[in-house]
Image (spheres, coloured by chain):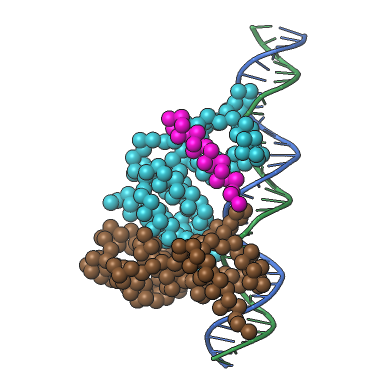
Chain colours: A cyan, B brown, C blue, D green
DNA sequence: TAACTTTGACTATCTTTGACAATTAGATTA
DNA sequence: TAATCTAATTGTCAAAGATAGTCAAAGTTA
């Protein structure tokens, strides 16, 4: 069964692709198109289109209100990695790590190969022996070290 | 009567064989099929499909969640890495990790760049939040996962 | 007896939904 | 004109739903 998040993520990315890197969204219309509640759109935007993933999301409420999603282009690799490091903060779940890495790959900030390597180091499997209550922090730490290594190449 | 672990192990291996080396599992569905509790699947995966045994296991929770098991083929050109994985065993100090990586670089099994990346993930600095008494085990685990990722490319 | 297997209650994480709050443009009114 | 109302939008947050993970006790086997 396809996940709604994935469907919506794809729809938004398509809009972005078709519009020179900027999607202009009417939240409820998109929700209707995707057959879901409007807040689901908000959820997708916050988990898949964050600044650490190379997007700027702006919005306005009220009549004529809308959401615009802009893919940040021409951002050099270093500042992208820096954004990622900021986004990680001091804890990250496996899924958050995955989302960040996918964003970085599609932004061209890192290669797919590097993303796979990094993911393999911070997956739940790799960290299985770390106590569950510190695992997210350990993951964040490792990931930041890995990204720093990429920066300092 | 055949042991459950063996039955489930075979089921998963069959799925892998039938799908180009990758099985996609819904844990509770498979448990139902095998007539056991879901956590039994987790047990089989951790005892029979570990990184030391050449499998990459990935998973996601939540709606649409799933587990994927990938069998990594050891081609000849990766025999050095396979031996490395065996050599790591279940614990490695930072120094041992460094030595192994240096050996791999001078043997031409991995690039210097990859060695630096891997080292940045398993350095004491990256693992600072892991309790010292498990750190070597965690390091070994991460390293095996990383090497498998390199092989699986 | 030591190691391995099986079970199940409990936990963690991710997604989906919906009720309610906040904001804004434009229309209406005093 | 200024204040107010109204309709149109997005934002927030917590609950419900859907998976997988953990851990320790009980059972089995070598």
Q: Where is residue A72? Give x, y as percent.
A: 42, 36
Residue furthest toward the front? B18
Q: A22 and B74: which one is in front? A: B74
Is A14 part of what is drawn in magenta?
Answer: yes
- Residue drawn at x 45%, y 64% is B21
User: Which quadrant does the N terminus of chain B fall into?
Assistant: bottom right
Name the residue at 42% across, 75% down.
B90
Establish if A100 lies above or below A16.
below
Q: Position of residue B24 (x, y in %)?
A: 53, 61
* Residue at the extreme left: B106
Q: Where is residue B111? Give x, y as percent.
A: 26, 60
Q: Is residue A109 magenta?
A: no
Q: Please, is residue B57 above or below residue B8 in the view?
A: above
Going by the image, does B33 lie left or right of A135? right
- Residue A8 versus residue C23: which sits nearer the camera? A8
Identified at 59% across, 42% down, the residue is A43
Q: Inspect this view and state whether residue A56 appears.
A: no
Q: Is residue A83 left or right of residue A69?
A: left
| Corner quadrant of residue D30 | bottom right
Quadrant of the image containing the C terminus of chain B: bottom left
Q: Residue at x 56, y 43 (%)?
A: A7
Q: Is residue B112 visible?
A: yes
Q: What secondary structure prevails in the magenta region?
A: helix
From the viewer's perspective, is B78 left or right of B145?
left
Picture layout, residue B103 above or below residue A3: below
Q: State which region is magenta.
A: A1-21
Quarter of the rendering containing residue B34: bottom right
Which quadrant holds residue A73?
Answer: top left
Residue A111, image x, y percentages: 36, 49
For residue A45, side relative to residue B146 (left or right)? right
């Amino acid at each position: 069964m396809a996940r709604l998040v994935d469907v919506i993520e794809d729809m938004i990315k398509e809009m972005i692709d078709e519009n020179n890197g900027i999607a202009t969204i009417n939240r409820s219309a998109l929700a209707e198109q995707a057959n879901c509640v409007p807040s689901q759109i908000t959820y997708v935007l916050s988990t898949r289109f964050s600044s650490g993933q190379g997007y700027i999301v702006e919005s306005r409420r009220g009549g004529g209100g809308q959401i615009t999603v802009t893919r940040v282009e021409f951002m050099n690799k270093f500042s992208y990695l820096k954004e990622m490091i900021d986004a990680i903060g001091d804890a990250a779940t496996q899924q958050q790590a995955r989302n960040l890495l996918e964003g970085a790959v599609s932004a061209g900030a890192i290669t797919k190969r590097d993303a796979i390597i990094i993911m393999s180091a911070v997956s739940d499997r790799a960290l299985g022996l770390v106590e569950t209550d510190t695992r997210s922090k350990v993951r964040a730490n490792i990931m930041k070290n890995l990204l720093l290594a990429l920066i300092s190449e």
